[in-house]
Image (spheres, helix red, strand yellow):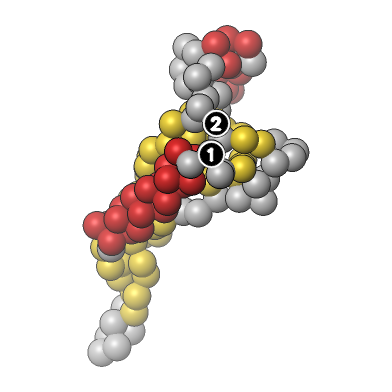
Amino acid sequence: MEAFESAHGMTFAVLSNLYQAGRGDDGQPVIGEYFYVAGERADGSRVEHQARFSSLRSATCEETGEAYFVSRRADMEARAERLCAAIQAEAAAGELLLNPNYWTEARPCYGSAAYVAGDWAAIDAAEERAAG
């Protein structure tokens, strides 16, 4: 996305992805979840808002100095939902322009017209081969 674009006809929702937040005291990965707002056009093409709301926050125990993670999943999901509601209200009023400073193009919906037109099946196959 290089210029301001109308969000007319788009649907918006909160999505989430998993990420490795760090390692626990046992050396095992600690998996967190982050929430974000995505918009989808009728052809399946998608955009994502830059704001990310992480479910985990690292902290340090004042007594022992050990690091640990604090879950704030419910609060972060609620923040993403509030952002989504505000975006949906602007879009419904016809006032939302997708500013490229806040929105980026994302992988289209699997099997959609945008997925087919962008030859994403070939891209997916190449990524799978590269991953082994």
On screen, residue 70 above or below 7: below
Distance from disc 2 to disc 1, alpha carbons, whole Å, reads 7 Å
Residue under the point 56% across and 44% down: 95
Residue type indicated by callout 1: Gly
**Which circle, 2 or 1, is nearer the viewer?**
1
Whole-percent x, y for residue 125 in the image: 55, 14
Residue under the point 31% across and 53% down: 77
Q: Is residue 44 left or right of residue 104?
A: left
Whole-percent x, y for residue 130 in the image: 58, 22
Residue type indicated by callout 2: His
Of 97 and 38, nearer the camera is: 97
Of 66 and 99, nearer the camera is: 99
Q: Which residue lies furthest to the bottom in this view?
A: 63
Residue ID for mark 2: 8
Q: Are marks 2 and 1 in contact (CB under 8 Å)?
A: yes
Q: Residue furthest front?
A: 93
Q: Judging from the image, what secondary structure is the residue with disc 1 in?
A: loop
Q: How many labels, in total?
A: 2
Whole-percent x, y for residue 26 in the image: 27, 61
Q: The N terminus is located in which quarter?
A: top right
Q: Residue 37's image quarter?
A: top left
Residue ID for mark 1: 94
On screen, residue 132 above or below 86: above
